[in-house]
Every structure is written in structure tokens, then in C-alpha cells.
Image (spheres, rainbow, N blue to C red):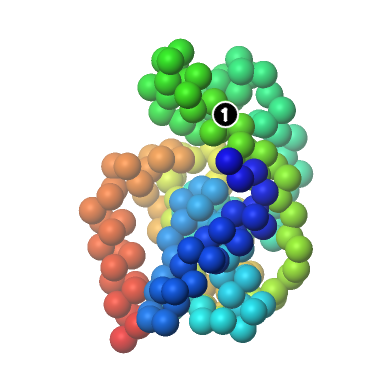
Amino acid sequence: MIDDCDQLVDYFHTAIGPLLDRPFGFFGHSMGALLAYQLTCRLHHDEGPLPAWMGVSAYGNPRDAGDSDARPHFMSDGELRRWLRDVGGSTPQLVDDESVWSTFAPVFRNDFKLLDTWTSSRSPGALPIPLVAFGGSSDELASEESLLSWQTSTTHFRGLHRYDGDHFYLMSHQQHLAAVVTAAMRSATA
């Protein structure tokens, strides 16, 4: 498992490299939003092709990463499960079922280590791409303010779309969200 953001960005950069000869966009949810942003920063730094559009979901602007005391990858199993329940950071099936938890706990810890230890290696300034933020109206991990802070990371902020729900709001809004993303990509590549 990769627990370092730069290494994970390297992996994705290599994997998508052959596909960058056509219009593309990124949509990232939660940790995926950080990865989409970091990968776009890498492409921008390398003067490579940039996504025509980027959507970031359920994750605040990493350049404004705060001073949260929560460091989930250091929590005991009981603390981590309780924290995930309290903030809506996981489905009850993953947290409450012992056999499922034993399988996924290492993945959670790995992902949280990546998030908890992320540091920006370079400040690219505002990215020259359209960016839209998405979030759940009752997401305790990504407030409206943190989602709106993405406007400082782009020269073309296209707004915030809020949906009823928590951190996993998208599970209840898949069709509408897919339509919004598809329309945004069509508009960006027209």
C-alpha cells in the first residue's frame, strides 16, 4: 500500500500518461480530491496537458489545511471506529462488522496516514482550469467554508454544489451528480 501522497501521485501520473493526448477531467471524492489536485499541480509544474475541468468533493482546499487535532492513523481501533461513526466517515457495515473491519482497518489507517502526513511540496498558485466543489450539507469532515476555499486554487472557480447528506452524500445522488459532471465536461471541452 502507498501511504505517501507524492508516491501515489507518481503512480497515477505514470498510469494516465498515455491517455493525456485527449481532453480529460478529474473528479475526486474525499482523499481523491487531494489526489486530483496534486496530480493537476504536478501536470501544471511539468507544463504538461491539464484537465479541462476538475471536480473536488467532500474535501477542503489542502492549501488551507487547518490545524485539526484529529490524526486518525494514530488512533486505537476503538477510537478510530468511534471517530468514523461520529463524523460519518464510513458506513456502519464497515465499522461495526468485525470481519469486515479487520479487512478494511489497514486500508483506513494507510489512507489516513497519507492524509495526515501530506505537505505541499510546491505552491503552484491558482490553477488555470475550471474547478467545481461538491459536498454534503451535513458533512462533518468538509464544511461549506472549507469547500468554498477551493476558489483560491483556481482562476476559474465554478461554484459549490451542495447535496443533502453527509460525507458520502454522493451515494444518494449518483445520477444527478453524473449529469452535472458530464455537462461540465461537455462545456469545458466544447
The image quadrant where one finds the N terminus is top right
- Outermost residue on the bottom side: it is 190
Q: Is residue 42 left or right of residue 56?
A: right
The picture places residue 36, in percent across and down from the top left corner, at 53, 61
> Image point 61% across, 18% down: which residue?
77
The picture places residue 159, in percent across and down from the top left corner, at 46, 67
The picture places residue 175, in percent across and down from the top left corner, at 23, 53
Residue 150 visible in this rendered orientation of the protein: no
The image quadrant where one finds the C terminus is bottom left
Amino acid beneath label 1: Pro
> Image point 57% across, 29% down: which residue?
106
The 10 Å Cα crowd at callout 1, few under 14, some 14 to 19, many 20 or more, is few
> Image point 66% across, 31% down: which residue?
72
Q: Check disc 1 and report its element: helix, strand or loop.
A: helix
Residue tagged by mark 1?
106
Foreground residue among 137 and 105: 105
Q: Is residue 78 above or below residue 34?
A: above
The picture places residue 186, in percent across and down from the top left corner, at 29, 77
Q: Is residue 175 left or right of residue 128?
A: left
Residue 13 occupies which quadrant of the picture? bottom right
